[in-house]
């Protein structure tokens, strides 16, 4: 094989000796393209670029990224969700006893109206371009007494903003009993519609009434422990994207890619491949820069100024059940010499919600994958000589 390749290199020299138009006495072009055929290169080590890899970098994105890093959690199955917990009503038994006309007899205590706003990410959903999906809320109760407490009220939750705005009654809390000496005891799980995408923002108990035993403070089980009777909530919700969601990511590195093109001695080429996306996110790729090899992860990234990549393309979003395919073609050029292996890239990205998809929960398993195990290089192999 080497012998035949040597003949191919010698052929132009033989012809140059026999024909005047190939006289090289005045100099010769030292760059020679041998062929223009496509070459397949292995890219199995590249990616995938998952939401999980972006998730780990959120804290480094000022503003929006920092907020998301504080309030988003990843479940064992990769589901991204937010959660919150708090008290709709909470009162110290000693304070309640002071409000009784005669603590020596059992009696009803009219508390009135009490409410709470959900915390965490819930109040920021609209601002962040996010929506809820698969919302869950569990009502729990605490009671430090040896006696049960019967409760009556008019309970409901508020959904604020958008087409989903509503006041939804919680019929299971119209009348209930707080068991004796209860600690975060689950009372009921709310039946929240699956197509409710705006978050629950407020819980309210109207006309709250407690049926207290005589001498409530003497009924406390542990006077060094919890001293409050309370009605609490535990809330969680998956995350999906609103149409207006947008998140810029400047200087994002997807990690080592080690694209093996150095052996082909290319000065300029086109890299063609097909990307498969299971992210419900449209990814606009702006500037792409090649980084010089790093000895370790702690070493500062340095851009290889000798390599240029003509970029600017958009990867369409899909879902785990219905991936989207996007063919891309990148022009890669070495300003001097030939292209080396490409160890790592630095990307400028803009993430947007993919239009036309049904609301889809975010998961760290979603990502962008290279469809096949190889990519195509075209543009000819250039041999560089010396003058």
Image (cartoon, grey):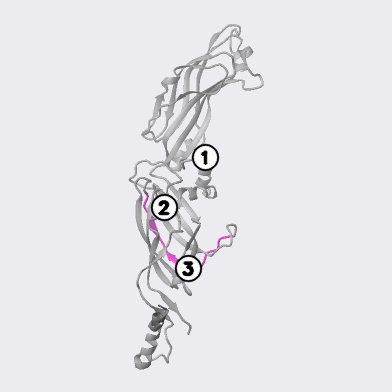
Q: Which numbered disc, 3 or 2, marks the residue closer to the eye?
A: 2
The residue indicated by pointer 1 is: 71
Q: Residues within 10 Å of mark 3 (few under 14, many from 20)?
A: many
Pointer 1 or 2: first along the chain: 1
**Residue shown at the point (44%, 70%) measured from the top left:** 333
Pointer 3 or 1: first along the chain: 1
Q: Is residue 295 magenta?
A: no
Numbered tag placed on residue 307 in the rendering: 3
- Chief SS of the magenta region: loop
Q: Residues within 10 Å of mark 2 (few under 14, many from 20)?
A: many
Quarter where residue 357 is shown = top left
Question: Mark 1 and mark 2: span between their CA atoms?
Answer: 24 Å
49 to the left or right of 182: left
Q: Is residue 303 magenta?
A: yes
300 to the left or right of 319: right
The part of the chain drawn in magenta is 300-317
Q: Looking at the image, is 376 positioned above or below residue 208?
A: below
Numbered tag placed on residue 368 in the rendering: 2
Pointer 3 or 2: first along the chain: 3
Question: Mark 3 and mark 2: span between their CA atoms?
Answer: 24 Å
Q: Which numbered disc, 1 or 2, marks the residue closer to the eye?
A: 2
Disc 3 vs disc 2: Cβ atoms closer than 8 Å?
A: no
**Residue shown at the point (53%, 29%) measured from the top left:** 86
Q: Position of residue 159 (x, y in %)?
A: 42, 30
Question: Mark 3 and mark 1: span between their CA atoms?
Answer: 39 Å
Q: Looking at the image, is 306 positioned above or below residue 50?
A: below
Numbered tag placed on residue 352 in the rendering: none
Q: Position of residue 310 (x, y in %)?
A: 41, 65
Mark 1 residue element: helix
């Amino acid at each position: 094989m080497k012998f035949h390749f040597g003949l191919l290199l010698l052929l132009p020299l033989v012809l140059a000796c026999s024909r005047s138009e190939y006289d090289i006495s005045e100099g010769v072009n030292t760059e020679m393209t041998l062929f223009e055929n496509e070459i397949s290169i292995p890219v199995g080590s590249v990616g995938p670029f998952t939401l999980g890899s972006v998730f780990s970098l959120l804290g480094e994105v000022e503003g929006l990224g920092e907020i998301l890093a504080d309030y988003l959690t990843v479940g064992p199955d990769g589901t991204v969700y937010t959660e919150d917990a708090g008290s709709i009503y909470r009162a110290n038994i000693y304070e309640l006893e002071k409000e009784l006309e005669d603590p020596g007899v059992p009696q009803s205590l009219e508390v009135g109206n009490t409410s709470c706003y959900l915390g965490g990410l819930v109040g920021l959903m609209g601002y962040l371009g996010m929506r809820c999906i698969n919302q869950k809320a569990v009502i729990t109760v605490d009671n430090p007494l040896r006696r049960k407490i019967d409760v009556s009220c008019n309970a409901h939750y508020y959904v604020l903003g958008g087409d989903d705005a509503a006041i939804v009654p919680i019929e299971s809390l119209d009348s209930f009993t707080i068991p004796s000496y209860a600690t975060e005891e689950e009372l009921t799980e709310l039946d929240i519609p699956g197509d409710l995408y705006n978050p629950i923002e407020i819980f309210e108990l109207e006309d709250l009434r407690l049926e207290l035993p005589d001498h409530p403070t003497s009924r406390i089980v542990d006077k060094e422990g919890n001293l409050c009777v309370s009605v609490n909530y535990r809330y969680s919700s998956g995350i999906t994207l609103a149409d207006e969601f947008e998140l810029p990511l400047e200087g994002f590195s997807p990690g080592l890619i080690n694209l093996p093109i150095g052996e082909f001695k290319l000065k300029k080429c086109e890299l063609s491949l097909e990307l498969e996306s299971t992210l419900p996110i449209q990814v606009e790729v702006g500037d792409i820069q090649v980084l010089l090899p790093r000895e370790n992860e702690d070493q500062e990234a340095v851009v290889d100024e000798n390599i240029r990549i003509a970029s600017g393309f958009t990867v369409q979003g899909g879902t785990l059940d219905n991936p989207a395919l996007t063919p891309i073609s990148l022009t890669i050029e070495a300003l001097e010499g030939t292209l080396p292996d490409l160890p790592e890239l630095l990307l400028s990205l803009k993430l947007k919600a993919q239009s036309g998809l049904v609301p889809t929960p975010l998961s760290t398993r979603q990502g962008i994958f290279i469809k096949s195990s190889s990519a195509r290089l075209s543009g000819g192999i250039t041999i560089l000589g010396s003058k």
